[in-house]
Image (cartoon, rainbow, N blue to C red):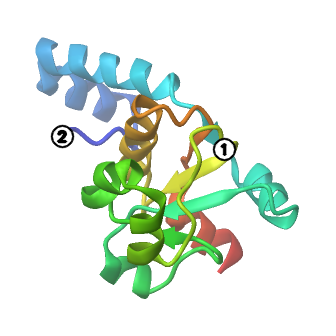
Amino acid sequence: MLSLCFRFRSRREMLRVLNGLGWVTLQRLGVAVRTMAGVPTVSLPELRSLLASGQARLIDVRTREEAAAGTIPSALNIPVSELESALQMEPAAFQALYAAEKPRLEEENLIFFCQIGKRGFLATQLAQGLGYAGARNYAGAYREWLQKEG
């Protein structure tokens, strides 16, 4: 998949890269950007406020190894590869496996994050597709958290 984070040293470099991508790739990039724009996100200041008031439920969708190396306090780790089955489990099975209460469909501020944003975005889309209307993506991801809070 194409990374959506570009940093160019000059306009000329940007044009050279974009010209090299080809028309089909640029169309796909446009679709991806429009799709990402449709997923509800939360900013770092908003996340801080929600956490301070106890109004956020955080799910770290990185691997267990990544989460063990450091995560946002109070986050529950459910790797993105397990997320769909986890969100469809019976509450008792979820509790037994993750030692936490299963999120409710109507839960507000069910916030997903990963290392740089892509898996968190996918997790948010998945949760929304399963009926979790309050699903949101912390687009700054753990990388931003670590830089600003760590």
Q: Residues within 10 Å of mark 1 (few under 14, many from 20)?
A: some
Image mark for residue 1: 2
Marks 1 and 2, how far apart at CA: 31 Å
Residue 63: x %, y % from top left: 31, 72
Residue at 31% over, 83% down: 65
* 140, 127: nearer the viewer: 127
Q: From the viewer's perspective, is 89 left or right of 145?
A: left
The relative height of residue 144 versus residue 4 in the rendered view (above or below) is below
Residue 85: x %, y % from top left: 29, 53
Q: Residues within 10 Å of mark 2 (few under 14, many from 20)?
A: few
For label 1, the residue is 107
Residue 136: x %, y % from top left: 58, 41
Residue at 22% over, 38% down: 2
Quarter in which the N terminus is drawn: top left
Q: Amino acid at mark 1?
A: Glu
- SS under mark 2: loop
The relative height of residue 140 versus residue 100 in the rendered view (above or below) is above
Residue at 64% over, 38% down: 106
* 145, 52: nearer the viewer: 52
Q: From the viewer's perspective, is 75 left or right of 81?
A: right
Residue 149: x %, y % from top left: 70, 75
Disc on the earlier residue, 1 or 2: 2
Q: Amino acid at mark 2?
A: Met
Answer with the quarter of the image where residue 83 lies: bottom left
